[in-house]
Image: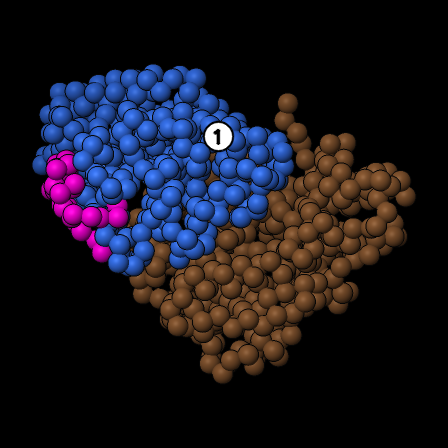
Chain colours: A blue, B brown
Amino acid sequence: MFSDRVLMGPGPSNPYPEVVSAFTRPLLGHLDPEFLEVLDETCDRLRAVYRTSNSLTLPVSGTGSAGMEAAFVNLVGPGDVAVVGVNGLFGERMCEVAARLGAEVVRVDAPWGEPLDPVALVEAHPSPAVIALVHAETSTGVRNDVEDVARGKGDALLLVDAVTSLGGIPFDADLWGVDLAYSGTQKCLGVPPGLSPLTVGPQARARLKQRPSSWYLDLGLIAHYVEGAGGRTYHHTAPVSMIFALHAGLGVLLQEGLEGSWARHEACGRALQAGLEKLGFELVAPAAHRLPQLTTVWVPDDLGGLSEADVRATLLQRYGIEIGAGVGVMAGRAWRIGCMGHTARPRNVELLLGALEEVLGR
Amino acid sequence: MFSDRVLMGPGPSNPYPEVVSAFTRPLLGHLDPEFLEVLDETCDRLRAVYRTSNSLTLPVSGTGSAGMEAAFVNLVGPGDVAVVGVNGLFGERMCEVAARLGAEVVRVDAPWGEPLDPVALVEAHPSPAVIALVHAETSTGVRNDVEDVARGKGDALLLVDAVTSLGGIPFDADLWGVDLAYSGTQKCLGVPPGLSPLTVGPQARARLKQRPSSWYLDLGLIAHYVEGAGGRTYHHTAPVSMIFALHAGLGVLLQEGLEGSWARHEACGRALQAGLEKLGFELVAPAAHRLPQLTTVWVPDDLGGLSEADVRATLLQRYGIEIGAGVGVMAGRAWRIGCMGHTARPRNVELLLGALEEVLGR
């Protein structure tokens, strides 16, 4: 018997019903005209969700971390300076990815659970190739101020991790002046993990590395297939079923409207956070930079004799609810509760609050 | 209205019905105990299909080309000698992938449509780090003799592209002594594209690069999640739905039995090839190295006034049959006809032969 989870961890979230149906669409070849229409429409929908007119907007054939790697491998090489904001696991990961490519990494740290200082980021180096930061830190539940960094970035390219933000909170690539952003399907887009929606602005495009160390993630080559100007050139076989799923998920999102999706994530997240505080939990992220879609709470000292892992296991076994453990400096000390995509519904908020109350005997 | 194709190109093939059902299984988190069971079972099934006891056997989170990149990035770095057999597009791609990583590439060419010379490969360099070749060249329909190269490889690591071979013709990783092999899901495994099953033998494992230039494809890190000895360490979010699909496809394959699957691919491929010759087509690959699962034929001079693209378009529009165009030196001159996975059924062979006869007026 298959378990039917309420996915309230840091991702994946529950997919929209339309997404599940899309997986059963008869398979098409990656050069079939009918598939190319779906691909084109998927890229159009991604442009709408990113609020961009960037031609090079596409689903990278890997998970969100593949998007991160695609971003760096196409923009930085040996000796290039990459300023990276670090206030959580995914900022750390950016440093590691960039360092492996030979970049000179200039870290700008903030404590986990606090937002980055935009001024520190733009002043960290006189002429960086890129300034990179995570918009919504999945490890801490903190929102970083991308707009403020964009305003002060100068000639540097601004590279943004929008994995947990896209579709859940406002993101405006063109208005803000984001040069490259990548996301993941399994958070606020309500699609299973497997693709990384990515967009490249004109300045980043002009500076794409020629023949980067990764052939698989070479955006210059992939563009010949995805954009299709003057015919499609095969690069690698597109993950057709996952693209059907993303196409459907973006359709649901855009039918609701971006503002509608943001408002729903906001309403559910704030209701969850208010409910948690009412139960006596202390929230990790400061109110002004607290994400609605991903809530971090400190694990209370008194769990009625249970360990924090026991509580998560009980939620899973008794209610089929998944919540996330803390990671990094918060391992064992915090929980991460997602309310993203199709999971972001009042009924799931109420369910989790009721279940926590029961399990913890509050 | 969705078109329902008979996928007889070079991949994807039609997925098994059980695979389509698996996509609709309720989504699980990538650390859910129930998902980890599915993942473990998937890796066990991959071991059975590769005929290996290699612990590090897993689905890489990208398409077959990601598997190729994972293979090289974990085994070769700047200055390492990579001997690469080239008799088609995918051998060429191996050279490009290895060169981007700074390897010294020693090419051993054979004409497109002919097999590689195993002796030339093992004698190409006195002490290569790796010898790499494609088992089943998807661009030409030719089988290369992996066993003969394995016997003579000496201290070099043998790296094999099994994208189009795995599940379709005999492959015996441990018996042959293959050090690393990767495949794709969308060929003879009967699963849509999106994952690359990969296996790493003990000698290759001992020589895995520490901190390779790719973080996403770092097999040393991924092992901590996939093998799970001493607990699972999160690396990247696993593409859960695609793994459900692969798990189901491998289940179908192993229920039929590996030998059964090989025999079915053999029978369908040979019937197709005999039928094509009866219709007057000339096959590209020489009989002794002709793949059953992927047939290349020269485009006849007389197509009754149609272009070769017209013929493919007519097959697609009138019969819903996809066949593949030629690539590289065979672009416009050959067709590639796949009979793989669930497509490898006598009914599809008969259908295609009948349709070709009708379209070409033979």
Front-most of residues B183 and B171: B183
**Amino acid type, label 1:** Thr
Location of the C terminus of chain A (image quadrant):
top left
Q: Is residue A309 above or below residue B280?
A: above
Is there any visible trace of residue B4 in the rendered image? yes
- SS class, disc 1: helix
Q: Outermost residue toward the left? A: A301
Pinpoint the chain carrying mark 1.
Answer: A
Q: Outermost residue toward the right? A: B362
Front-most of residues A43 and A91: A43
Is there any visible trace of residue B222 in the rendered image? no
Q: Residue at x 38, y 51 (%)?
A: A209
Give how far across and how far down residue A88 sits, in percent. Answer: 19, 43
Front-most of residues B298 and A306: B298
Q: Is residue B145 left or right of residue A12?
A: right
Give how far across and how far down residue A187 sits, in percent. Answer: 34, 32
**What residue is pinned by disc 1?**
A42
Give how far across and how far down residue B236 sits, in percent. Answer: 34, 47
Magenta segment includes A109: yes
Front-most of residues A208 and B167: A208
For label 1, the crowd category at 10 Å Cα-Cα, with few meaning under 14, some 14 to 19 and many 20 or more, is: many
Give how far across and how far down residue B356 sits, in percent. Answer: 82, 42
Q: Is residue A249 left or right of residue A169?
A: right
Q: How many marks?
A: 1
Q: Quadrant of residue A259?
A: top left
Q: Is residue A29 left or right of residue A129?
A: right
Magenta segment includes A95: no
Magenta-tinted stretch:
A104-130
Q: Residue at x 48, y 30 (%)?
A: A42
